[in-house]
Image (tube, helix red, strand yellow):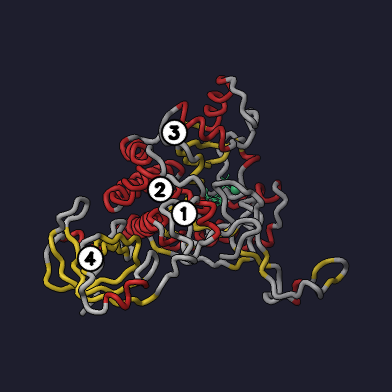
Amino acid sequence: MKRRKIKDILGQGKEQAEIVIMGWVRTRRDSKGGFSFLEISDGSCLKNLQVVADHNIDSFDSISEKLQTGSCVGITGKLVQSPGKGQSVELQAKSIEVYGEADPNQYPLQKKHHSFEFLREISHLRPRTNTFGAVMRVRNRLSYSIHKFFQDQGFVYLHTPIITTNDCEGAGEMFQVTTLKPDSIPVVDGKVDYTQDFFGEKTCLTVSGQLEGEVYALALSEIYTFGPTFRAENSNTSRHLSEFWMVEPEMAFYDLEDDMNLAEDFLHYLFKDVLEHCSEDLEFLNKQIDKTILERHRNITENEFERITYTDAINILEKLNKNFTYSVEWGCNLQSEHERYLSEEVFKKAVIIYDYPEEIKPFYMKVNGNGKTVRAMDVLLPKLGEIIGGSQREDDYGSLLKRMQSKKLNSEDYDWYLDLRRFGSAPHSGFGLGFERLVQFVTGMENIRDVIPFPRTPKHARF
Ligand code: ATP
Ligand code: MN
């Protein structure tokens, strides 16, 4: 007989003469009347299915000892209306098979509550907790709805390379990819001879798919990437990973305003979709993790984003006369404390800041007529800070070349990028959304390490 998923069984709530379920025992409780109550999870939803096992069923005695928290079972039985509270139906077991035992003296997930720090040490077992199940189902739905949002509008999903020779200027420190042996690196004139390396030149793991995305936007009009990116920054914060997933749409014929409109529509869409399709998991997280999640989601979906220029943002922050750790003046990089203050305290909603100083932004952003600012925008969320960074790209060959020279970039390395402005250049824009930051905001998880299955951070790449 085919296995039924617990999500479907609970969703339908109908009695049935015989079904098969498979999953892991979350708890076992024995009653005096000769029954055991098992809570079974198969991960298809937050809720467990309650199974009532009469101690008189065939061979119960021989398996009883193996039916422990953590063990894996297959159960055939009759689905009946449940007299107990909290579930519509329960399964009366006819036969139980134990696939895998879990010795109660050794299985680490015995208690009901474990700290996230402890669970990070056992990242191979933490998916079996309610919280990680909920977070990963939400993560899954968000991935799906990201694709759905773009696909429904005819964007082309583009796979950009992971190994690259570009450094997407300043986006972050890069991990090098090499087959040179650390103890015998070929050196010529005091420099590493990369002609002897695998690719014949220095290569790294990508920090962003944007530049390659631009190539395809200037042929297919609207594309998006959704893939892993890597940054070797030694920032041990609750918002930075060394390996994280990024969503990067890139659109021909969009100016900065179109770009901001797309970013706002995109976030509105994702929050509405996840509230609709993950309500059970989100209500659980709202209860267990952060009681303000649902309220914060509503704040995003029900309000237009505030849009202010960088210059106005600086003026507001300066007038506050607040003692920030990093002081504020025109030309400075906004720090997360400033970004959070603007969205949390000043506007109390999502904020888009645009038109940043030219000096603090990369070469590819389009310079405004004043020569001082570039057409960049960041989307900031309360409690999180930056979630999206984007810009209109410089589409004029001469201006781009000038900017590359002033930033001391070797224009020969970007020959192909300059070609896009030499042949059929078009106004175009795009942005990058850090996927784990989104999952963090949606689930209310404090630490970004707890929203990705296997986090990679400084000094940590093993399970
Ligand atoms: P931050 O200032 O927060 O480090 P950034 O300015 O370096 O971010 P971008 O280069 O604009 O970020 O990258 C685009 C998006 O990718 C950011 O808006 C953020 O959501 C996400 N992001 C950037 N770095 C990381 C990281 N190390 N881990 C997880 N997400 C990141
Ligand atoms: Mn960064």
Q: Earlier in the sequence, mark 4 or mark 2?
A: 4
Label 4 Cα crowd, 10 Å radius (few <14 / some 14-19 / many 20+): few
Can the viewer see residue 83 in this picture?
Answer: yes
Q: Is residue 362 left or right of residue 107?
A: right
Mark 1 or mark 2: which comes first in sequence? 2
Label 1: how many Cα within 10 Å (few below 14, some 14–19, many 20+): many
The amino acid sitting under disc 4 is: Gly
- Residue 36 occupies which quadrant of the picture? bottom left
**Which residue does the numbered mark 2 point to in the structure image?**
443
Residue marked by disc 3: 307
Quadrant that contains the C terminus: bottom right
Secondary structure state at the residue bearing disc 2: helix
Measured in 3D between alpha carbons, the distance from the residue under mark 1 to the one under mark 2, in whole angstroms, is: 8 Å
Image disc number at residue 451? 1
The answer to which of 92 and 326 lies nearer the viewer is: 92
On the image, the x and y values in percent for residue 25 come to 34, 65
On the image, the x and y values in percent for residue 136 come to: 40, 58
Q: Answer whether labels 3 and 1 touch (C-beta < 8 Å).
A: no
| Three-letter code, disc 2 | Thr
The correct choice, above or below, for 338 with respect to 396 in the image is above
Question: Comparing marks 4 and 2, which lies closer to the viewer?
Answer: 4
Secondary structure state at the residue bearing disc 4 = loop
Give the amino acid type for the residue marked by disc 3 in the picture.
Arg
